[in-house]
Image: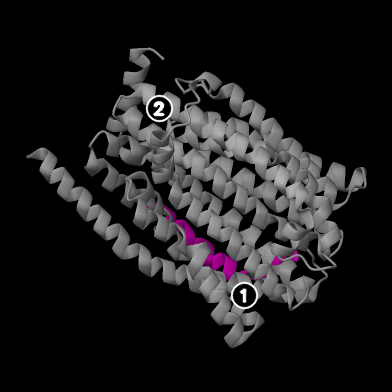
Amino acid sequence: MNTTAQDKKFNMMTTLPVSRLVSRLAVPSIITMMISAIYNMADTFYVAGIDIQSPAAVGIIFSYMAFIQAIAFFFGQGSANYISRALGARDRDSAVMIASTGFFTSLFTGVFIAFMGFVFMDELLQLLGSTETIMPHARAYFRYILLGTPFIMSSFVMNNQMRFQGNAFISMLGITSGAILNIILDPVFIFVFGMGVAGASLATMLSQFVSFVILLHLSGRRDGIPLRLRNFRPCLAHYREITAGGLPSLGRQGLASISMAYMNQLAGFYGDTAIAALSIVFRVTMFATSIVLGFGQGFQPVCGFNFGAGKYDRVRRAFWFSVGVTAVYCSCLSVGGYIFAERVIALFRPDDRELIMLGSSALRYECLVYSTVSFVTMSNMFLQNTRKTIRASVLAASRQGFMLALALYVGRRLWGLTGIIAAQPISDGLTFLLAVPFSWSALREMDIAGEVKRK
């Protein structure tokens, strides 16, 4: 990349008004997250028409998907956070090496995880919460997901690295191409070819491979950093930086995987319908949160670049702008979700009254505190991108991690199935109370650093 192009990218990231810059970068990220959430929800929607065990099986495997996504985001956001700060400090050579290190380490790790998954398939599915009646459907769905694991993980890494370089539009092209293909292939494989739940899994695997190929091809476009094996430098210094930037993501999504498996195990005591209902509600809320995450992903490169360049006032303005926009969105969604909860759940299985009752109750509980998600999400991204590793990791591990596990344990003992259903909103409220002092202290520290720099 020539010096003029580097200067142009630097000037855009550090001088354009933050509201315009965040919004510009957020739009392709929002589209990417929404389409990805739609195709994740499409699997549940299509297989729900087969039987009650099929959406439950998809929910079981989603715990594994969260696990590999956690590892992918560890390498992806860990390397990407460093890349954005390095580019902000105009150190492109370091950014090039850590990009390839994060990508190839994730790819090789995915191959190893897939191999171990095939060896210990039944044991893993039982650990994820599968019942005897769900097990055959879970096996059928799991096989193709395992085959696609290396490509799924590597695609997440490339997606994060592109976004943090300010190339969210290119990332959107790769992710959405695969997602749209998945939505098209789902009904073809499930119904036309009669593959059932295995067809949904095959569609997901093929679409993820397509995304992988497109993203790899586009990785060096638009002044981006190309991924080359010759730049793969696995050393302690690089992994230390990846750990500092990626540990919050690993904590957040890794513990989320464990908590979801724990939730499935507890819900299994109340039947397959309870697992299916919670799976559907999780997909619905994931779709809603995709817009918050997409907007936050527009904030992250702005935060990283300007923090690396020492422009702390722009980091603060970008943070509060992002919190304000997403808070309004979450509040509006909470009202609509509470009012139309039954209709939303009925879209999946309109004739199953038990599932609609359980699912709508869980969705209404979530809507009571959903407005807190905006501040928690932006706070976590702010802490992560300004290298407040401990606070970012603790906060990241809270909402769908140890706070959720604690709420599940206590809730089930006190209120049974109702306690399980209410666990996520309880966790949301507790995590918000934790996010406030964490963010306030980090903002104050940044202000002090800015005052010292000006002197």
Q: Quadrant of the N terminus?
A: top left
Mark 1, mark 2: which one is toward the viewer?
2
Kind of residue indicated by mark 1: Ile
Q: Quadrant of the C terminus?
A: top left
Residue at screen point 66% across, 27% down: 213
Range of residues picked out in magenta: 323-347
- Picture coordinates of residue 77, whole percent (x, y): 47, 41
Residue 19 sits in quarter: top left
Q: Which secondary structure lies at badge 2?
A: helix
Residue 50 against residue 217 in the figure, above or below: below
User: In the rendered image, is residue 344 in sight?
Assistant: no
Between 190 and 275, which is closer to the camera in this rendering? 275
Is 205 on the left or on the right of 299, as rendered? right
- Picture coordinates of residue 58, whole percent (x, y): 74, 57
Q: How many marks?
A: 2
| Circle number at residue 217 | none
Q: Which secondary structure lies at badge 1?
A: helix
Is 167 on the left or on the right of 433, as rendered? right
Between 138 and 201, which is closer to the camera in this rendering? 138
> Is residue 324 found inside the magenta-colored segment of the image?
yes
Residue at screen point 69% across, 71% down: 265
| Circle number at residue 95 | 2
Residue beneath disc 1: 421
Residue 350 sits in quarter: bottom right
